[in-house]
Amino acid sequence: MGHGWQGTVLKLMRGKDFTFTVRSNERLSERLHRLSFTDGGMLRATGVHPTMWVRLWFDNGDRPHQRAYTLVDPDPATGTFGMDFALHPGRASDWARSARPGDTIEATVQGSEFTVPDPLPSRLLVVGDAASRPAIDSLLDAMPLTPATVWYETSHPRDSDHTPSRGSATREVIRLPRQDQGAHLVETVRAALAERMDDSSYLWIACDTATTRALASFARKQLGIPKERLHALGYWKAD
């Protein structure tokens, strides 16, 4: 399957291509499906970092279609990992529903990067939703002794079935229903950050693109948070 102009651009940006093979599939809930993969040599070639994600290429007729997914519990020793798929209408969800052991899918690694802060922050302040939950789990795993507050936006009642909780330190999860296209989350988090953010905290944001940009801009311009204590990446675009 060709990757079109998107694949060409990723190649120019030194993207690395791999083929994953499905090992197993598991329905975690009404809205969530997990597939396990062998990595085609990826983890040995690229290494692993917290919140690591890759681009999967899905068949879409003669037009390439790619979506980014976070690795769940990657194991370089065995060359395996999982991925969680939210089940809603779309090419990616349709593929995940029907995937069986032995099926393969092409992937590109480009753009995923994150380094654990050194020294470790006094507290993690995290803003995310169901799409970024695997990444949040990975982040909490990477800093198991660092207290964290997570503002977790939900767009469906079942989103709360799987909320971030990794690590042995205190994990405060504040669940907020998605309202006004994310405006409710932005208003709530802005007010909280003004009170909670200090010189030794770390802010990590991964929501829809508009919400992420709004909160990152507030953090930089209004709160003066330096880039070494802020990571922000839009995980999806609202319709």
Image (cartoon, rainbow, N blue to C red):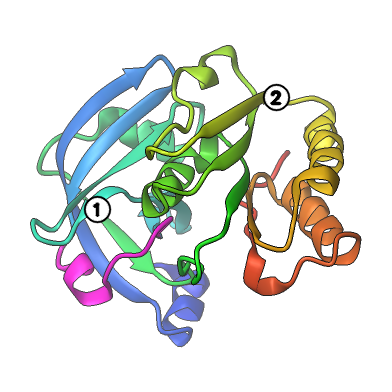
Judge whether residue 169 is colored magenta.
no
> Mark 2 and mark 1 in contact (Cβ < 8 Å)?
no
> Does any portion of residue 154 appear in the rendered image?
no
Query: In terms of depth relative to the viewer, which is nearer, 39 or 188?
Result: 188
Q: Would residue 175 appear left or right of 94 to someone viewing this image?
A: right
In the rendering, which numbered label is found on residue 176?
2
Sequence order check: which comes first, mark 1 or mark 2? 1
Q: Residue at x 36, y 37 (%)?
A: 84
Compared with 103, 55 (above or below) is below
- State whether the magenta stretch is mostly helix, strand or loop: loop
Q: Which residues are magenta?
A: 40-52
For disc 1, the neighbor class at 10 Å (few under 14, some 14 to 19, many from 20) is many
Q: Residue at x 44, y 32 (%)?
A: 165
Percent position of residue 1, x then y: 31, 62
Percent position of residue 207, x then y: 65, 44
Q: Residue at x 42, y 40 (%)?
A: 92
Q: Would residue 216 appear left or right of 81 to someone viewing this image?
A: right
Query: In terms of depth relative to the viewer, which is nearer, 123 or 89?
Result: 123
SS of the residue under disc 1: strand
Say which residue label 1 marks: 74
| Mark-to-mark CA distance, 1 and 2 | 29 Å
Q: Would residue 31 appear left or right of 160 to someone viewing this image?
A: left
Compared with 121, 36 (above or below) is above
Query: In terms of depth relative to the viewer, which is nearer, 167 or 160?
Result: 167
Query: In terms of depth relative to the viewer, which is nearer, 178 or 31?
Result: 178
Compared with 219, 151 (above or below) is above
SS of the residue under disc 2: strand
Image quadrant in which you'd find residue 239: top right
Name the amino acid, label 1: Pro
